[in-house]
Amino acid sequence: MTSLFFEEIEVGNRRTAGPYFVSKDEIVEFATKYNPQPFHIDEQAAARSVFGGLTASSAHTFSILILLLTKTEPSLRILAALGWDELRLPTAVRPGDGLYLEVTVLEKRESKSNSDRGIVGNQIYLRNQKTRNSIAMHQHGPPCAPTRCEIVDLRRL
């Protein structure tokens, strides 16, 4: 797997990952542990809800996005995610959905406080098999990618 350093990243570059297939059992298991709302864990209650069926929780959907970020090709040499902005979840994730991640570099700049690092801004979409956005967001104050000359000791972070 190719992993890019800061100076190799270009504005407009696009990275993708997926599909990630979501099962009914996974939705129920995650929600039972972290967000036990009836429309996430009970098919009959979900059918009567505004969703009209079982849906993954927003936390579960975001977790899938984070997993797929680790699988983008090419990947970035990331030190830390500094924040997320304009997070939207316009389409619920349902059992059987295949999710695809698309990340586009919108901006990059050298760090003002650490000259051996850069900051990269991304537009991120998590889409289902019908190309409907399940998550749309801008990564605000985005990840730091070390320059090629830096050797990163993650224990110091």
Image (cartoon, helix red, strand yellow):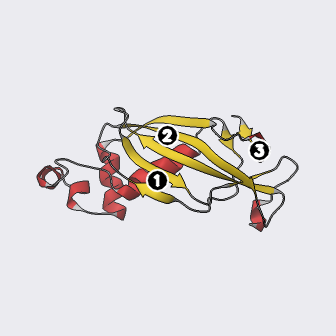
Residue flagged by tag 2: what amino acid is it? Leu
Residue designated by label 1: 63
Residue designated by label 3: 5
Residue 38 in the figure: left or right of residue 97: left
Give the distance between the C-alpha atoms of the residues marked 3 and 2, in whole angstroms.
21 Å
Mark 2 surroundings: few (<14), some (14-19) or many (≥20) residues within 10 A:
many
Quadrant in the picture for the N terminus: top right
Indicate the secondary structure of the residue bearing disc 3.
loop
Residue 74 in the figure: left or right of residue 139: right
Nearest to the observer: residue 146 or residue 107: 107
Mark 3 surroundings: few (<14), some (14-19) or many (≥20) residues within 10 A:
many
Quadrant in the picture for the C terminus: bottom right
Give the mark, 3 or 1, whose residue is nearer the N terminus.
3
Residue drawn at point x = 46 percent, y = 58 percent? 86
Mark 1 vs mark 2: give the one in front: 2
Residue designated by label 2: 101
Residue flagged by tag 1: what amino acid is it? Ser
Mark 1 surroundings: few (<14), some (14-19) or many (≥20) residues within 10 A:
few
Give the distance between the C-alpha atoms of the residues marked 1 and 2, in whole angstroms.
12 Å
Residue 12: x percent and y percent? 63, 38
Q: Which mark is residue 114?
A: none
Q: Do tag 3 and tag 1 residues touch (Cβ < 8 Å)?
A: no
Give the mark, 1 or 2, whose residue is nearer the N terminus.
1
Q: Is residue 73 above or below residue 67?
A: above
Residue drawn at point x = 19 percent, y = 54 percent? 42
